[in-house]
Amino acid sequence: MDYVTLGRTEIKVCKNGFGALPIQRISFDSAKEILLHAYNSGINFFDTARFYTDSEEKIGYALSDVRDKIYIATKTAAQNADDFWKDLNTSLNNMKTDYIDIYQFHNPSFCPKPNDGTGLYEAMLEAKAQGKIRFIGLTNHRLAVAQEAIDSGLYDTIQFPFCYLATDKDIAIVENCKKNNLGFIAMKGLSGGLITNSAAAYAFMAQYDNVLPIWGVQRMSELNEFLSYNTNPPSVTGEIKELIDNDRKMLAGEFCRGCGYCMPCPVGIEINNCARMSLLLRRSPSELQLTPAVQAKMKKIENCLHCNQCKSKCPYGLDTPKLLEENYKDYVEILNGKEF
Ligand code: SF4
Ligand code: SF4
């Protein structure tokens, strides 16, 4: 089995981490079955967030008996110290534990620091002094905030999107974490569903010994795919190399990662799927995207107000309204019989 050490935390875990966002969508008992199977198969790092509805409770429900054998990371999106403490106490309660291994600021638009007026970083230090958290982390989708957090010396880990579609600037974040002895936790290893070959996704990550991918799984079959790489780790050679090279060519440039940070939209457009529909149609079973329900969602693009709220919130700097228009045009043409 491959292991990763998260920089100066010295937390050493199985190279496959568990991303607990998708277990929100399944029952408590199904989540328990999957979480326990992951644990019994060697996975010992679980990442969740206060924001993921009942995901933390499911972790508490499934794993409280083995709490001392696993590492838990969760996140707060609090903007002030009062909300920070509310979130932290709720998370501890939900997960039936009295400490969190890595407590992360959840995608803040700035890098929290002491004396910045928010009281957030001071609250982290106080929580650490009280033994409620062990290490301080930050998650982000913005290169500048991630780099600032690394340079600040205030953080033990960075969680950032990373997959085989990464740009040189994304790779530089990984390398800078290594240089500065910070742990690097990779989110969106399947690029929000655009990468469909998990072996290729894993093989790419395996090239970086400081990277801990957290795979979001909600089905046993998905989990078993990743578990199989514990015993037979794939590498970037032959067919996998060719597939990665082709995907990098096809998906080069600006595309929507499906993160949803631009939402909600005032007219209810499901931007995180509609703005990448052309890719979803071509990279996943297209019939799933052509149902009456999806057609109705796409039709809402006609109501776009061009208010640019989404554009201003997109951490990738995408021109979201334009992207929606392009995807809608392609979609309508496909409905009308265009070959794709
Ligand atoms: S520009 Fe259009 S899609 Fe974006 S938030 Fe405004 S109405 Fe919604
Ligand atoms: S448009 Fe930007 S913010 Fe919105 S889902 Fe896509 S990548 Fe995320």
Image (cartoon, helix red, strand yellow):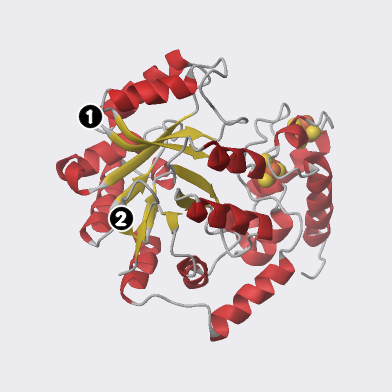
**Image quadrant of residue 209?**
bottom left
Q: Residue furthest left?
A: 65
* Image x and y of residue 3, in percent: 33, 63
Mark 1, other Cα within 10 Å: few <14 / some 14–19 / many ≥20: few
Q: Nearer the viewer, mark 1 or mark 2?
A: 2
Relative horizontal placement of residue 144, taking residue 337 as reference (left or right): left
> 215 or 204: nearer the eye?
204
Instruction: Name the residue beneath numbered marker 2.
Output: 12
- Disc 1 marks which amino acid? Asp
Locate ligand 2 by image quadrant: top right
Between disc 1 and disc 2, whose residue precedes?
2
Q: Residues within 10 Å of mark 2 (few under 14, many from 20)?
A: some
| Amino acid type, callout 2 | Lys
Q: Quadrant of residue 67?
A: top left
* Disc 1: residue Cβ within 8 A of ligand 2's nearest atom: no
Q: Residue at the location (36% across, 41% down)?
A: 73
- Disc 2 secondary structure class: strand
Residue 216 position, x and y percent, is 44, 52
Task: Identify the residue shown where x is 31% and y is 47%.
Answer: 31
Image point (59%, 65%), residue name: 164
Residue 290 visible in the current orientation: no
Label 1: which secondary element? loop
Q: Is residue 282 left or right of residue 284?
A: right
| For residue 313, side relative to residue 115 (left or right) | right
Position of the N terminus by quadrant:
bottom left
Report the residue at 68% width, 65% height from top.
282
Residue where numbered disc 1 is placed: 98
Where residue 335 appears, x then y in whole percent? 78, 58
